[in-house]
Image (cartoon, rainbow, N blue to C red):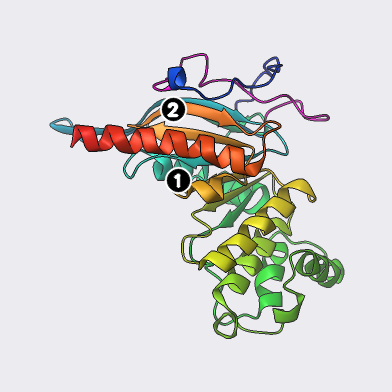
Amino acid sequence: MSEVYATPSPSVTGSAAAFSRNNYGAHAGGPNAQRAGAVFPGSAFPILSVRQIEKVFGTRDSITHALAGVSFDVESGEFIGIMGPSGSGKTTLLNCVSTIDKPTGGHILVGGRDITGLTKRQLAKFRRDDLGFIFQESNLLDTLTGYENIALALTIKHEPTSGIPARVEAIAKSLSVEGVLKKYPYQMSGGQRQRVAAARAIVSDPKLVLADEPTGALDSRNAQIMLETLELMNQQMGATIMMVTHDAFAASFTNRVLFIKDGTLFNEIRKGDTTREQFFSRIMEVVAFLSGEANHAA
């Protein structure tokens, strides 16, 4: 099967417009919903391009459009959040990007390469080489130590054995988990397990890190530490991160938030030069509006 590669689109210049009441209801084809970030130096393609993705569940008599023509780009070095009400399609979107699920229509390109038509063997290699995963539960292997869990990501890529210890120790030190490398997951706190999972996700230098509610099972203190860890991975290690979250505070650590509603891209806001507190307030405006709409519909 031949593979499809995208043609780089011109970068969009200028800062994103501040969110206002007039932005409510922006759709996938609207001027506020489809703006791509500036192309980062050295990046010919966006790391991720989602093009008119559709996902349909059910039969002819009962069809549900979980995703209905969603399109956006994620540039190299971005940290973006995906938010939306329960049932909006944000988890379905993450599952399609991660190749856990296959879209009914549209295309998903990573580094310019269309992944929607890959064979099972090609998909396995793609997940191994190009993606890093952080789940709500750490999903560490209970029978392996922290060191072994992190090293596993390098072992399955057939990295030279001699270089693995230094890489594991370096990433563990950067994410402040060097003290638990000899411990098993049951001997770690929830926050430590999540940071070890983050180390495992980034140690192999993937193109894209996907985080699914990474603070959902943590208390407020450990959630803050985890979010600061993701911020460090993005700002100091150059990781490109897409995080699905229902938490506006967590989303305020990103530099762009996409809001999904009824399977479509409802709106997008960017942090720009604002403070985290100001960005959080803008996120809460959209969350409040979506909650109000949901209550009104009910």
Q: Nearest the camera: 36 or 225?
A: 225
Count neighbours of disc 2 (C-alpha within 10 A) and say few if under 14, some if 14 to 19, many if 20 or more: many
**Residue at (57%, 82%) from the top-left corner?**
143
User: From where the camera sits, is residue 183 visible?
Assistant: yes
* Farthest left residue in view: 61
Residue 32: in magenta span: yes
Name the main secondary structure of what is drawn in magenta: loop
Residue type beneath disc 1: Asn
In this figure, which residue is indicated by the disc labeled 1?
Answer: 95
**Mark 2 sits on what residue?**
265
Proximity of marks 2 and 1: CB atoms separated by less than 8 Å: no
Asked if residue 53 shows in the view, the reply is no
Q: What's the mark number on residue 83? A: none
Taking the magenta stretch, the answer to whether it contains residue 117 is no
Q: Is residue 20 left or right of residue 68?
A: right
Which image quarter holds the N terminus?
Answer: top right
Q: Which of the two residues, 167 or 180, is positioned nearer the viewer here?
A: 180
Percent position of residue 98, x then y? 52, 46
> Residue placed at 66% from the left, 54% from the top?
230
Q: Is residue 247 above or below residue 14?
A: below
Amino acid carrying label 2: it is Leu
In terms of secondary structure, where does tag 2 sit?
strand
Magenta range is: 24-46
